[in-house]
Image: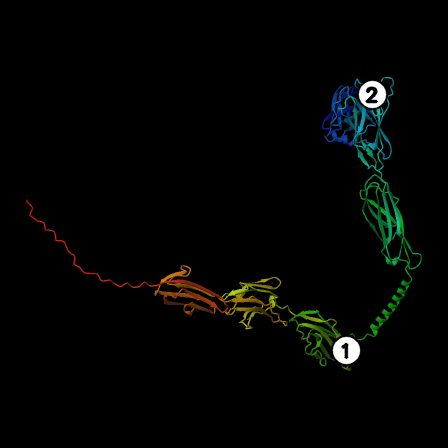
Amino acid sequence: MFSTQTPLEVILNPPVELQEGFPGETLSLNATIINQADRAATIDIFLDRVSQTLSQWCQSTQARLALDPQQCGEVTFQFQIPFEALPGTYDYTLVVNFQDYCSEETRIQYPRRLKVLIKDRTVTRFHDPTFTLTPATNPDRPLQVQPGQLSQLRLTVKNRSDRVDRFHLKCFELDEDWFTVKYEPNQFQGTGLISAADGLELNPDQQGEIAFELLLPEDMPAGHYSPTVQLISANSPDLILLDLVYLLVPAVYSLNAELKTILGNISHQSGHYQLHLTNQGNLLRELKIGAKSQNEDEFCRYTCEPSPVQLLIGSQIDVDIKVQPTRWWRRPWFGSGLQIPFQVQLQDLEGLPISERLPQGKLLWEARPWWQFLLILLSCLGLVSGLGFTVWLIFFKLDPPPELTTDRPTYIEGGIVRLNLKIYNPDQFKQITLETIKDGVPSEPQFFNLNQGIPQGLENCTIENRILDCRNVDTQARLPGKYNFTLQLLPRDSNKTIETRLNNDVEIKPKPVPQIVSFSPEKAQYQKGDRVLLNWKVKNFSQMTQLIAIGKSDDGVAINSTNFNFNGNIPQNLRQRCSQLPNDELSCNDVPVILPTTPSKYTLQLQPKSNNYQQPQLSEAIKIQVLAIPPKINSFTLNSKTPQQSPTIFLTEEQIITLKWQTLGDDVNVTLQPFGDVAASGSRTLKATTNLSQIVLTVTNERGQSVKQAFLVQIQPALPVPTPIPLPSFTPALPPPPPYPDLKTPKK
């Protein structure tokens, strides 16, 4: 584009007014400036009327050139379209500003447009159809649409192909009930074109229009919308022709509030009102509800429930408002009552505007009933009586009665109950008597003579301002129980005593007594000679001075007791077996005690001892049995053989038999057959006879338990001794001796 009206020549590249690009691309605008004047000039080149979105894409929107005559300069503006950029057309103006030789400012403007295409759009070829939207919209200049009112956009479609084509318009983001597509009929007739109501048919190189009418619902939320419209070509169904329509639904803040009176006249209750809210706008509302008096003096408390509330578009809600007067003295005494006007207050938590005309209410606080005048009259009479009583106390006051108090209502055993006495004008009395009643039974009273000043026993007393004040008077009450005390004063000039009784009883609580919580043996049966082990747990162990293990047999014979001396500490012989637990408990395990060796059943108990007034109780009884040693044969041999080795013994008649035995057991009787009763251990010898068949050793105790061992004996009779037979004697014939050889001297 060139300008011939000024001494400057401006060349733009690209020269077209509309530049197109996809998200992620960078578009450049080059401006070449030539100074054709005969003097130097300073030229400002900048982008004007740039939207906020477009200004973020161009880092530098202005530049300055200083050019001499016939000198040229170049300025480049780059637009970096981000990947998240919304499709649309963005308008701006390129301005060339300079001062000419007449020192007058001259401005040259070039309207420009930058169009961001949809990423999925195919490359537009020369013969591809095109379309434009009127009015043009972009994110910075959306089309304002009123819900419930008809808005129209027009699409101009051009068929650049050499064939007749039919076009359809689609919009997928909007509900089908929200828009209507109307295809304008072709103005050319007689060309052989068949028109249809469901599409736009165009001859080659012909353009037509499609009306896109929007009718959004009345409850459409306010905000920005960007539906996509797609133009579909019947000849090229795969061709993607898309564009975005930027819409703005303006906010409607209409909010209807109505106040209904439920209880408007009150005497002692709260006024009750109901606020009915209706959201007639197209925004979500979050409201805080309150109320305020319309009078200058505010003396009511307003309670709104629920508050805050949330109202959806077109929704309704009821809010209870209770009005309670807080200044009771403002209530009128007579008349028609007091009217309290108040104003409902609404606050939008999002800061959205609210109508200034909000409902108002009135609360009528009725006058007081007639009987309240009677209360006032009685109050006045009481006031007069009080004044008279005050005068009587000042001028005709009698001596107050004596006071008898105690520092605390309860004591623990071992403590002494002490009282505090206060006697007015003690010089008017000659004797003090302190009576003590324990558990309803009176005890010996205490007497104090006042004839000679402070008596003995009341050393902690002082006399000031004619008041005898005694502290910590010993009452001699030490044993557990409930006590009450009476103070008697005997006047000097009368025999009628003045009595004062302690208001509440004083209790001396006994110290907690030791208590056997659990008591058990290690086992229920023991063999004679075994150690008997006991386990126990004692509560209030610190109060225990001694623990005695006592018992008796089933025959009623008492056994020797076992004593453990505590006195608040664990004895030395139990420190390895006992442990002190929290809450003043003592647990002992496997403590040995001594029982008689006589087998029997025994009953054992634990007897704790204490220095307290109340003695502890015996523990539960447990049963222990000491078992006798059962009869047992340790050894039994016949000629050094045992019945286990040789149950049957083969002997010959008259053979010597040696028997040895050894037995154990309590109160046993040992029988050896054939000898009869024998000692528990011993030996016997006998000769085997043919009458002997078995030898039996039997051990029996008094409880009928018995054991026995036996040998079976088989006796073989002895063989008779044979008589010797005499043999005949003879002399055996001996052969003659052999001749002796002739021994000669050997030759030399």
Q: Position of residue 746 (x, y in %)?
A: 7, 46
Q: Position of residue 642 (x, y in %)?
A: 40, 61
Can you tell which quarter of the image residue 579 is in?
A: bottom right
In the image, is residue 580 above or below residue 497?
above
Residues 37 and 195: in front is: 195
In the image, is residue 569 above or below residue 118?
below
Is there CB contact under 8 Å for labels 1 and 2?
Answer: no
Q: Secondary structure at mark 2?
A: strand
Q: Position of residue 281 (x, y in %)?
A: 85, 40
Query: Crowding near pointer 2: few (<14 within 10 Å), some, many (20+)?
Result: many
Mark 2 lies on residue: 202
Mark 1 lies on residue: 498
Can you tell which quarter of the image residue 138 is in?
A: top right
Can you tell which quarter of the image residue 357 is in?
A: top right
Which residue is outermost to the right?
Answer: 335
Does residue 88 appear left or right of residue 478 in this picture? right
Quadrant showing the N terminus: top right
Quadrant showing the C terminus: top left
Q: Which is nearer the N-term, disc 1 or disc 2?
A: 2
* Amino acid type at image mark 1: Ile
In the image, is residue 310 above or below residue 430?
above
* Amino acid type at image mark 2: Leu
User: Residue at 31% of width from left, 64% of height from top?
Assistant: 720
Residues 252 and 715: in front is: 715
